[in-house]
Image (tube, helix red, strand yellow):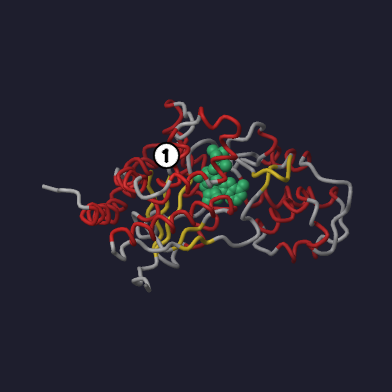
């Protein structure tokens, strides 16, 4: 069956589970801002996802504001895009429940992120952490979003979103939810940990030295890149030469993404250079790009009431799209509404 043409719309989100990292910036925020103006964009601070692992209630609201400040400081315009936090739009949780009843346990068992995060302690994890991909499907499909820009780590979850949409449409004999396209492109789709190039850079990683935070100052950024794990070899002249050098490849990808260049052009520019030349150049570039954003985040965070106002206004706009889609979903499923 060919699908209805859905109006192009972007949805994506970031969880307020810690300070924003360079991975969040390059893999998500910078690209979200780049899509603004191309089609309608809905961007969310997904606080319901954050509590799938323990969050201190005294910190959560502030972390939510900080993620919002990161979006705004990087160039997101709340008059052009919808910016809000998930828990202010209850339709997310409601559609999430419907999708818990559509998704199959076998599908969830295949989600590699749960296995990575839960490790040997799966039995002790929250049910929310296990089920979160179906809430993520609800986040996306509640807006009939056609495009979802994400980092590579979220690809499997967007594919699951398509499976949930297809099963819902099939089970109820409708053509109601779009088959969303994941938008995963550019050199920064998986920024790796600075101390171990085989692990993703994460907000909640053990050591602060393994990540660049969006709020790090110039000294910290320089120190972290200086201490970043590398190998004794100079840079080769093509990307093929970086095949078994994950840490080196990661630093090239970071440079390329910050510089709006390709990894190929970056390796050609630094062919033959040693780390003594490349790392300071990378640190200077990162400071030049991140410092103005960090300054703007600090300015915004000094006025939390204004951030709350922006998120409140964004939530109203989000509800205008989400509520009718939820109501139609209830009708399709057969829920009685008096
Ligand atoms: N290292 C990364 N490289 C590229 N993209 C990344 N993203 C996250 N880390 C990287 C992208 O940022 C968006 C928001 O992700 P999230 O914070 O909601 O969830 P996450 O991927 O689980 O992020 P973290 O930093 O690893 O959080 P914690 O440690 O709390 O679990 C997504 O588009 C993601 O792809």
User: Residue 173, relative to residue 90: is it above or below?
Assistant: below
Secondary-structure class at tag 1: helix
109 horizontally vs 188: left or right: left
Residue 312, image x, y percentages = 32, 44
Ligand 1 within 8 Å, label 1 CB? no
262 horizontally vs 98: left or right: right
Q: Residue at x 36, y 40 (%)?
A: 308
Regarding residue 243, the answer to whether it shows in the image is yes
Residue 259, image x, y percentages = 67, 59
Name the residue carrying label 1: 47
Quadrant location of the N terminus? bottom left
Q: Residue at x 49, y 55 (%)?
A: 75
Q: Residue at x 35, y 40 (%)?
A: 87
**Disc 1 packing (10 Å; few <14; some 14–19; many ≥20):** many
Residue 268, image x, y percentages = 80, 65
Residue 245, image x, y percentages = 80, 51
Q: Quadrant of residue 331?
A: bottom left
């Amino acid at each position: 069956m060919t699908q209805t043409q859905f109006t192009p719309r972007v949805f994506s989100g970031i969880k307020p589970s810690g300070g924003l990292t360079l991975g969040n910036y390059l893999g998500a925020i910078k690209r979200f801002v780049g899509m603004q103006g191309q089609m309608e964009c809905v961007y969310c601070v997904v606080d319901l996802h954050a509590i799938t692992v323990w969050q201190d209630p005294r910190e959560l609201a502030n972390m939510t504001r900080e993620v919002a400040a990161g979006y705004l400081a990087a160039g997101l315009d709340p008059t052009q895009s919808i910016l809000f936090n998930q828990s202010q739009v209850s339709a997310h949780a409601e559609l999430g429940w419907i999708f818990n009843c559509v998704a199959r346990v076998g599908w969830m068992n295949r989600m590699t992120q749960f296995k990575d995060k839960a490790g040997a302690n799966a039995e002790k994890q929250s049910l929310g952490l296990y089920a979160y991909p179906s809430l993520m499907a609800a986040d996306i499909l509640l807006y009939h979003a056609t495009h979802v820009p994400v980092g590579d780590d979220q690809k499997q979850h967007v594919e699951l979103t398509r499976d949930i949409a297809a099963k819902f449409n099939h089970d109820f004999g409708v053509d109601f939810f779009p088959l969303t396209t994941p938008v995963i492109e550019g050199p920064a789709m998986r920024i790796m940990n600075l101390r171990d190039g085989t692990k993703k850079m994460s907000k909640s990683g053990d050591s602060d030295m393994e990540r660049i935070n969006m709020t790090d100052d110039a000294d910290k950024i320089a120190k972290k890149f200086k201490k970043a794990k590398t190998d004794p070899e100079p840079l080769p002249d093509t990307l093929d030469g970086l095949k078994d050098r994950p840490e080196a490849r990661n630093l090239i990808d970071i440079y390329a993404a910050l510089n709006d260049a390709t990894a190929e052009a970056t390796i050609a520019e630094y062919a033959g250079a040693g780390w003594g030349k490349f790392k300071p150049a990378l640190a200077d570039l990162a400071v030049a790009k991140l410092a103005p954003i960090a300054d703007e985040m600090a300015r915004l965070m000094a006025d939390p009431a204004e951030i709350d106002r922006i998120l409140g206004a964004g939530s109203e706009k989000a509800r205008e799209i989400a509520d009718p889609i939820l109501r139609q979903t209830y009708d399709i499923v057969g829920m009685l509404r008096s």
